[in-house]
Amino acid sequence: MPVMDSSVASEPPTHEDVAVLRIEGMMCQKNCGTTVASALRACDGVSAVSVSFPLAAALVHGTAQSNALVVAVEDMGFDAQVVTDASESEELARQLGGGDDIPAVAPAAQAQAAEIVLRVTGMMCQKNCGTTATNALRNTAGVSSAVVSFKHGAALVRGTASASDLVEAVEMMGFDAEVVADEFDAAELAHQLSMEHETVAPACKPPIDSTLASNHMPVMDSSVASEPPTHEDVAVLRIEGMMCQKNCGTTVASALRACDGVSAVSVSFPLAAALVHGTAQSNALVVAVEDMGFDAQVVTDASESEELARQLGGGDDIPAVAPAAQAQAAEIVLRVTGMMCQKNCGTTATNALRNTAGVSSAVVSFKHGAALVRGTASASDLVEAVEMMGFDAEVVADEFDAAELAHQLSMEHETVAPACKPPIDSTLASNHMPVMDSS
């Protein structure tokens, strides 16, 4: 059944054209159909859209040029062509427009915004897991805002999306989710997540990218010299809950470095500890770490603190890491296979790359099956980041191929947005319903 807008009558709008497109490559109505509908709706001159996965077709009302519609769909990674056969076009338009066999659905405008709290389990950290779950929820049609907290094992979502759609979005990322039914628990979690979301940013400066060390090296800030800075305090923290150096260690280092008054940070997963130079208050450092989902406490024993500070500062057993400033920025092109669409898969791969330490920018294209990454991160770290999301990746070694892909991805990234208006949130239909525009 198509999802019909309340303003769409049985007859198409007057003084407007009607275009019927064949859409190839959609895997479902919910994500792919919504993605295509949003891409078409975002084009200048479009007044109404209906997309059907079962029919592999789209009906578009408005004054937009047919070639612009085709380009908009293809930019999302699907194939599209205008149906030129009159009888085929008429039949598809009838079905997509809500004929005898396809009853109209209640207007999407009647959906009421709501606040839903979810229990989310299976996350291992805030940086990757929390970000992945957050993006999955924010990419769900009808969601106006979403906050996920690894620390509280919960998510706060506002919008018109149904609870079942939100649960499904989280579970598609590999986590477990359920609605918090108890009103008191839901209200308390909503308050905690709202406070956490509002207070973490003002308490800290914008994070500075860190450079990864090996599994036996602390993550060192570029301002850490062989001797600690003068006229500053030194705090040693015990950090519990880290699962690795690369992601967890980097997350803790960034959280500490972002706090006001911090001049240098060293974090070690093997030592489960952190060394912080600067004028920041110890309790502020503890809060910063705990906001990332780890446990932290200040080491008060003088001998233990001194020994950990020696090791974290680059002693005999743990060599110091080269300053981040020495790393050279580079452009790396990856082949990425295994993606099924741009909206979820492409976004997931993009976020994985952007969350990798040393990355300054990243663009992933489902259409080209490639990624363009700029920054100081190593190729192996980039490949690992993509593969952790379930896709396959390899560096494009051929210089000509890499240059051509880099050009295509740069052009795609720069030209998609200007060609369209900002997308309007769409409301999900069932797996057998096309998505209709609210205008």
Image (tube, rainbow, N blue to C red):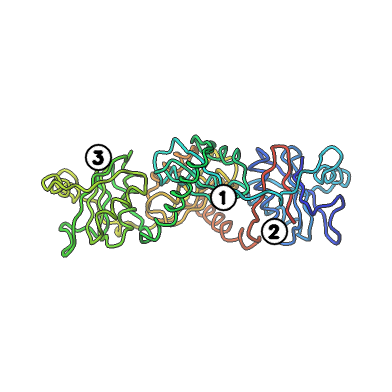
> Which residue is disc 2 drawn over?
43
Type of amino acid at the residue the image marks with label 2: Cys
Residue 18 place in picture, x, y as percent: 82, 54
Where disc 3 sits, the SS reads loop
The answer to whether 429 appears left or right of 310 in the picture is: right
Q: Which residue is drawn at 76% across and 59% down?
A: 65
Q: How many labels does the image show?
A: 3
Nearer-the-camera pick, 353 or 79: 353
Residue 285 place in picture, x, y as percent: 28, 53
Select label 3 or label 1 by which is in front: 1
Where disc 2 sits, the SS reads loop
> Which residue is disc 1 drawn over?
158
Crowding around mark 3 (Cα neighbors within 10 Å: few <14, some 14 to 19, many 20+) is some
> Which residue is disc 3 drawn over?
270
The numbered mark, 2 or 3, whose residue comes first in the sequence reads 2
**Quarter of the N terminus within the rendering:** top right
The numbered mark, 3 or 1, whose residue comes first in the sequence reads 1
